[in-house]
Image (cartoon, rainbow, N blue to C red):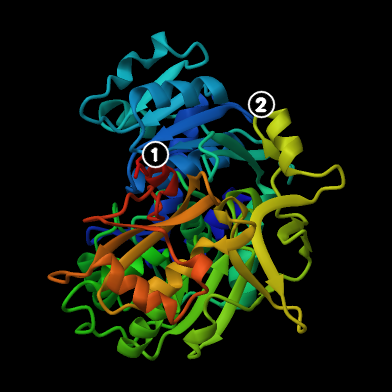
Amino acid sequence: MNFAEILKKRADEFPDKPAVIFHDAVVTFRQLKEISFQVACGLAQQGLKKGDKVAIFMPNIPEYIYSFLGVFLLRGICVPLDFMLTEEEIVNFINHSESKILIAQEKKGLNLSGLKEKCPSLKEIILIGPSWQDLLNSKISLPEIKIEPKDYSSIFYTSGSTGHPKGVMLSYKHFENPVKCFDYFLHPDDKDVLICPGIPFSHLGGLDYLLLTLYFGVTLILMERFHPLEFLKNMEKYKTTIFCIVPSMYVAILSLKEYDNFDLSSLRYAVVFGAPSSPVLLERFHKAYPNAYLLNGWGMTETAAPNSYLPTGTNTKEIAGTGKFLPGTEVKIVDGELWIKGEAVMAGYYKEPELTQEALTEDGWLKTGDIARCDEQGRYSIVGRKKEMIKVSGEIVFAPEVEEAIQRHPKVKEIAIIGIADELRGEVPKAFIVLKDQEKLEAEELRYFLRQHLAHFKIPHYFEFVPSLPKNRVGKIDKEALKGRAVN
């Protein structure tokens, strides 16, 4: 993807159209181009060259977007860092990635200006404030840069379900995949309005919003963090047409008493991604907002997500299930696991040859770790993560299936299932349950309910009622954290 060309094109086509709206402040496509080029020139004056790495540490604010684009204009490599990281984690990621420059916003409790002493590769630290303004005041011109599609664009650190941080290497060519997938399945145009509900730019799902804004000329409503009430207010105010959120965000929205009081008639597509979704939740959402076409998306950082959409229309019974991949993507199921091959597959894990070899076969197949099924019409459904398979006395139990059954109980707000060790059976399911406000529920009552929906070996052996479930920065339930406290 050539960011210089696309920025100039959008600025010429829509100079005064809002590209980004943040806290009601508007950034036009002309301003987006001008500021991004200023950042690129400033970084060039700081000595940044093609292939150099720039770490970015800040919340979802416009400066994050300008930083991304400034680095991309120089054909550098972005290393987005989550704003929730500790100082020790920041140091580890900067050192592992060998980042040359850090662009950051100050955060209480962190000594960012002192990181040079701990990070040998780090030559410059640019903080939002005076040093950022100096960057924008650079007087040099943007240097000419030879562009190759396979130039590396980014290293996204993702722990996935293993807990071991891995730097996913993506090229500039990889950025074409999300655009192609959206274009093929959703057909957006410059009349659409996207809303990024706090999906962090340190996650590929956050960056996808920027790619779509640039490629299709849509307006992006940017939220610094997810707040369900503000999300609904913003959608109504700006007449949002498309959003993509994770299942737990639906839970938060539907927990609001006034969730169905908003005028969301402009909404064309409501997309759920990031984890197996509950038809129960989506049925409730669809009942409140019947104009929205519901889709289930699938993809990974390692596959330059998204890669498939599982369209269901008004039939939310199928939302957890069937759909097809973007044409040109090869897909197969090996021993129940989904394997994928094609241009969207990552280059590998940065400086992790053994992990790369575990994930990628010699002929380019990525082992996704997702358990999938394919029907007679070639439509795929994701059953769950391979690491979420629970073996109970030799029987296979998939956590999402149990979660879906429990979610159907009218008193249950949110649910997570993990497997824990058991001397007799090897492993058994344990349920962490959040109840709706003012509700009470006993474990035995829930067991009786589940006997009507699940085979006996799938019913959790332990139930723990909790006030909330831990979430990662994307909003998905953090099951690794639950495993760490699963003591009976």
**Residue 8 x/y as whole percent:** 54, 55
Name which residue lies at 33% across and 88% down.
265
Give the alpha-carbon distance from disc 1 to disc 2, as whole Å. Answer: 28 Å
**What residue is pinned by disc 1?**
484
**What residue is pinned by disc 2?**
351
Name which residue lies at 23% across and 72% down.
255
419 or 341, nearer to the observer: 419
Q: Which quadrant of the figure has residue 50? A: top right
> Of circles 1 and 2, which is in front?
1
Query: Image check: 98 left or right of 446?
Result: right
Please tell me whether mark 1 sits on a helix, a strand or a loop: helix
Work out which residue is located at the far right of the displayed protein and give it: 363
69 or 143, nearer to the observer: 69
Q: Which quadrant of the figure has residue 433? A: bottom left
User: What is the three-letter code of the residue carrying label 1?
Assistant: Gly
User: What is the three-letter code of the residue carrying label 2?
Assistant: Lys
**Residue 48 x/y as whole percent:** 55, 25
